[in-house]
Image: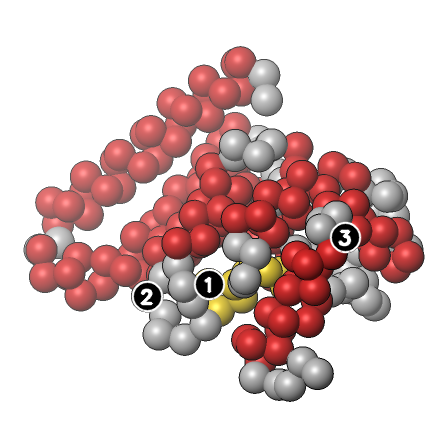
Amino acid sequence: MNARLFWNTLVVQAIVVAVPFAILGLALDEDFFEDWGWLAGPAAWLVCALATAVVVRLPPVRVLVGAALTGLLPLLRRLPVPFVVDHMGRIEAARGLTDPAFTALLGLAAQPNAWVKISGIDRIGAGKRPFHEGLPFMRALAEAMPERTLWGTDWPHPNVRGDMPDDGEVVDALFEAVPDAGLRQSILVDNPARLYGFDAR
């Protein structure tokens, strides 16, 4: 992201967030936020993100995916049952490991009912095989949540927008991202057995 786009986005986001929230804060009483804040907050955040994307001409879908992850995580944390974030939350590898959406995803390590699936390596990068830009994200999640990480090939790879993944390369990517055999055993056998309640033997 160039400097001009960064500052334009920052200014637009500040206006888009500040104005509606100020109006809502004055128009609605405290009871509304106590009863509906858990839903209104994430919904408002998505609307603000979409408005910002439109104004500064960013790809709306990609912006919404990142906003959805950060906006919906507080809602997911309230769930009384285990939940799985698939495809590494469809974060954008180009934004790097310090991107707020990915940082929020890593924060699920402190949430005992949160699981993450490090599949869909082709969905977070530029769409060019062998999708190596996704390896650091797989590795970081596996290390952050070793007992609650899952994996799958994502076969038959529906809705592919770039190169069609080669399942052999997808398996190789897992071995490269998770070189430790014990951790792979957890991801491929022990963790899914514990989550889904079947015998791993």
Q: Residue at x 49, y 47 (%)?
A: 106
Sequence-first disc among 2 and 3 = 2
Side of 171 relative to 189 (left or right): right
Sequence-first disc among 3 and 1 = 1
* Mark 3 secondary-structure assignment: helix
Residue 7 percent location from the top left of the image = 45, 18
Give the amino acid type for the residue marked by disc 1 in the picture. Answer: Ala
- Report how far apart the C-alphas of labels 2 and 1 lie in the structure: 11 Å
* Mark 1 secondary-structure assignment: strand
Residue assigned mark 2: 78
Check whether the beta carbons of the residues at disc 2 and disc 1 lie within 8 A of each other. Answer: no
Mark 2 or mark 1: which is in front?
1
Residue assigned mark 1: 114
Side of 167 relative to 145 (left or right): right
Residue 34 percent location from the top left of the image = 15, 61
Residue assigned mark 3: 174
Mark 2 or mark 3: which is in front?
3
- Vertical order, 48 against 187 (above or below): above
Examine the image and state in which quarter residue 126 appears: top right
Give the amino acid type for the residue marked by disc 3 in the picture. Answer: Leu
Q: Around disc 1, counting alpha carbons within 10 Å, would you say few (fewer than 14), some (14 to 19), or many (20 or more)?
A: many
